[in-house]
Image: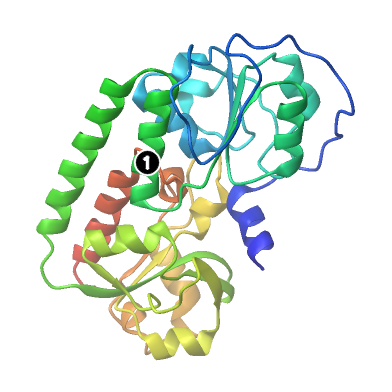
Amino acid sequence: MKDALLKRLCLLSLAMAVVTSCSKPTPPNGPAAQINGAASTIAAPPARVVVIGPSSVETLFAVGAGQRIVAVSDFCKDPRAVDLPRVGGQFDPNLERIAALNPDAVITQGSNQRLADFCEQLQILFISLNTDSVQSWLDEVKKMGDLFHMQASAQRLTADFQNDYQQVADAVGTRTKAAILISRNGVDGMIAVGGGSFLNELLQTAGGENVFADNPNAYFNLSQEALLHAAPRVLLDLSIAAASKPDGSGPSNADIWAEFADDFPTLPAIADKRIFALSKDYLFLPGPRMLQTVHTFSECLAAPSN
């Protein structure tokens, strides 16, 4: 289920062929290091970087290293990277295309041993990150600041974020019981956010109380009975954002309400018409735009009953 969910979130492309052998000059920093979730300052910052992970692309631009990116994943929607080559996704990176770009570093979200071995073979610096919380993103910013010798920029970014984030958290009054759906097929096949997701953290900061926070999983299959029993007063439907429509459009709040009304007429979120269809791509990105997600959640939580 976890693998299927990750594929749903990333919208993975078809598997590509693996390159069995190729050569590349030794990078200026010497033999490549395998850096799993850590990056120490090196003699010269990478000049050509492949980034597999939309949130990390946004982080590099925010730190000031965006001009060093030479390729991104198939799922990157950042307009600043629209003209850059695409090299697959976390589970199906196109190794041949990556090699042709002659990078001196590859940054990815999540692990991929095949990609790690490939980078080791070609002496490419490999950095595997696992950004799944606000704190882990702040850690990522520091690592990128160290890696690209942009510590001052990274420190400003984290300081500004933490200040704004805390201001929102401090302004929260009474909490509203809410639930977040990230995928569904009508009112069936629902996948909800549990306590292990960064979205749970952002919802809490926005003034919400996740009715499924006790579930330790980041995401889990949700039955209709469990939703009725939890009785959220606000329902945030991110399933349209998960589908990542190119134009960001999707059903209206009224459309989503109509889908749920027949099956859940007594659910407080349905009775009060406080169900919201959210389609912005940044909702799934644990990166610089998490504050926008917090504000989006805050607006929904503060919306009056209809």
Q: Looking at the picture, does residue 145 appear above or below residue 5? A: above
Would you place residue 150 above or below residue 210 in this image? above
What residue is shown at x 40% (from left), y 57% (from top)? 198
Which residue is depicted at the point 28% across and 22% down?
153
Q: Nearer the viewer, residue 56 or 263?
A: 56
* Lateral position of residue 117 relative to residue 7, left or right: right
Q: Is residue 277 visible?
A: no
Identified at 31% across, 57% down, the residue is 202
The three-letter code of the residue at mark 1 reads: Asp
Q: Which residue is mark 1?
A: 139
State how the image is colored. Answer: rainbow
From what the image shows, is residue 230 above or below residue 138? below
Can residue 68 be seen here?
yes
Locate residue 124 relative to residue 130 in the image: left or right: right
Q: Quadrant of residue 163?
A: top left
Give coordinates of residue 217: x percent, y percent. Answer: 50, 70
Question: Could you say which is closer to the camera, residue 169 or residue 300?
Answer: 169
